[in-house]
Image (tube, grey):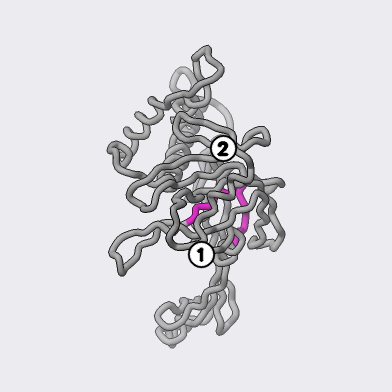
């Protein structure tokens, strides 16, 4: 698939203008994932996750194959040199591809027992952040809600190893606690997915939330473990066009050379930066505007690595 991606950017055509139809890329995607073989509406966020994870798998396999060939001499014997194998059940250091270096961040899930005050932290990696949205809100407020403190009580009590007693296991192990999610290591490219499609029990189906959510050109990420602001600049937006989750269209806004471009299939046009604001969403529940920001791409203005 990396070679197919190159075909989108690099063309053998002599023309310096025009469009490139990503036919081979689409064929490869359909071959790898059956969900993209039909003409049914597919979700851009699910496609992004599939693409990044598929690229990681391919790059890791290519790297493993390359190392195997280098470690083996032409005669088929292992060449002399330091061994990369690790014994005693230890794991090898995971391969860091260009996908990891650009998109991967680390979240820390902190849980504090309200009885003994012990804090338990569990790290997990992410390629994007999926944020719940509310009417007339902003990315900053959505991020604050993402990292807000949640109390675990009643049936959701926390199993605390510190409080657990072998003599009174069933009574002492479950305690009330508070948990929150914070960003331990911000990624170079911060991808934010707005949850615009929500399942409504009273309707028995998913509904698109056309809420107005402001996404600024410059973003300060303050909900980090170090409590230090990380500054980002918006450089791309995926727009969902349509009133429902089962149909619609996607277009993209991309900033290049200080100019914003609107990509709508083979049509590309330059737009003013102020036009980006028209894709924030609708301030009223019912509106004729169905073009809403769905996936945001922010680039770091600093160095985290």
What residue did someone put label 2 on?
98
Question: Which residue is painted at 51% across and 64% down in the image?
Answer: 135
Q: In front: 148, or 259?
A: 259
Local packing at callout 1 (Cα closer than 10 Å; few below 14, some 14-19, many 20+) is some
Mark 2–mark 1 Cα distance, whole angstroms, equals 36 Å
Classified by dominant secondary structure, the portion drawn in magenta counts as strand
Q: Which residues are magenta?
A: 182-194
* Residue closest to the far top: 14
Question: Which residue is painted at 46% across and 51% down in the image?
Answer: 289
**Residue 61 located within the stretch drawn in magenta:** no
Question: Which residue is painted at 61% across and 60% down in the image?
Answer: 140
| Quarter of image, res 54 | top left
What residue did someone put label 1 on?
135
* Residue closest to the far front: 288
Local packing at callout 2 (Cα closer than 10 Å; few below 14, some 14-19, many 20+) is few
Q: Earlier in the sequence, mark 2 or mark 1?
A: 2
Mark 2 vs 1: CB contact within 8 A = no
Q: Residue 184: x percent and y percent?
A: 62, 58
Q: Residue 64: x percent and y percent?
A: 47, 33
Placement of 70 over or under 12, stated as above or below? below
Q: Residue 268: x percent and y percent?
A: 52, 31
Q: Residue 224: x percent and y percent?
A: 64, 60
| Quarter of image, res 136 | bottom right
Assign a secondary structure to mark 2: helix
User: Which circle, 2 or 1, is nearer the viewer?
Assistant: 1
Res 78 seen here = no
Placement of 281 over or under 257, stated as above or below? below
Res 285 seen here = yes
| Quarter of image, res 255 | top right
Assign a secondary structure to mark 1: loop
């Amino acid at each position: 698939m990396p070679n197919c991606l190159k075909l989108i950017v690099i063309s053998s055509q002599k023309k310096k203008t025009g469009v490139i139809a990503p036919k081979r890329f689409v064929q490869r995607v359909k071959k790898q994932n059956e969900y993209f073989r039909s003409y049914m509406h597919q979700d851009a966020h699910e496609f992004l996750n599939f693409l990044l994870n598929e690229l990681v798998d391919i790059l890791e396999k290519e790297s493993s194959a390359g190392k195997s060939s280098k470690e083996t001499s032409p005669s088929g014997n292992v060449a002399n040199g330091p061994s990369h194998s690790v014994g005693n059940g230890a794991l090898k250091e995971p391969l860091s591809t260009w996908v990891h270096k650009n998109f991967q961040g680390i979240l820390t899930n902190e849980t504090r027992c309200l009885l003994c005050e012990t804090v338990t932290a569990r790290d997990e990696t992410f390629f994007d952040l999926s944020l719940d949205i509310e009417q007339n809100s902003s990315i900053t407020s959505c991020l604050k809600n993402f990292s807000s403190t949640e109390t675990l009580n009643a049936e959701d009590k926390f199993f605390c190893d510190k409080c657990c007693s072998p003599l009174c296991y069933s009574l002492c192990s479950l305690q009330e606690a508070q948990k929150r999610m914070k960003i331990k290591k911000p990624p170079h490219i911060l991808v934010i997915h707005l949850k615009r499609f929500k399942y409504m029990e009273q309707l028995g189906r998913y509904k698109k939330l056309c809420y107005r959510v402001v996404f600024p050109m410059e973003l300060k990420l303050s909900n980090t473990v170090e409590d230090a602001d990380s500054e980002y600049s918006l450089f791309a937006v995926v727009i969902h066009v349509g009133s429902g989750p089962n149909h619609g269209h996607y277009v993209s806004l991309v900033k290049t050379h200080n100019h914003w471009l609107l990509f709508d299939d083979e049509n590309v046009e330059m737009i003013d930066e102020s036009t980006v604001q028209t894709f924030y969403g609708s301030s009223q529940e019912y509106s004729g505007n169905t073009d809403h920001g769905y996936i945001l791409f922010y680039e770091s203005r600093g160095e985290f690595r």
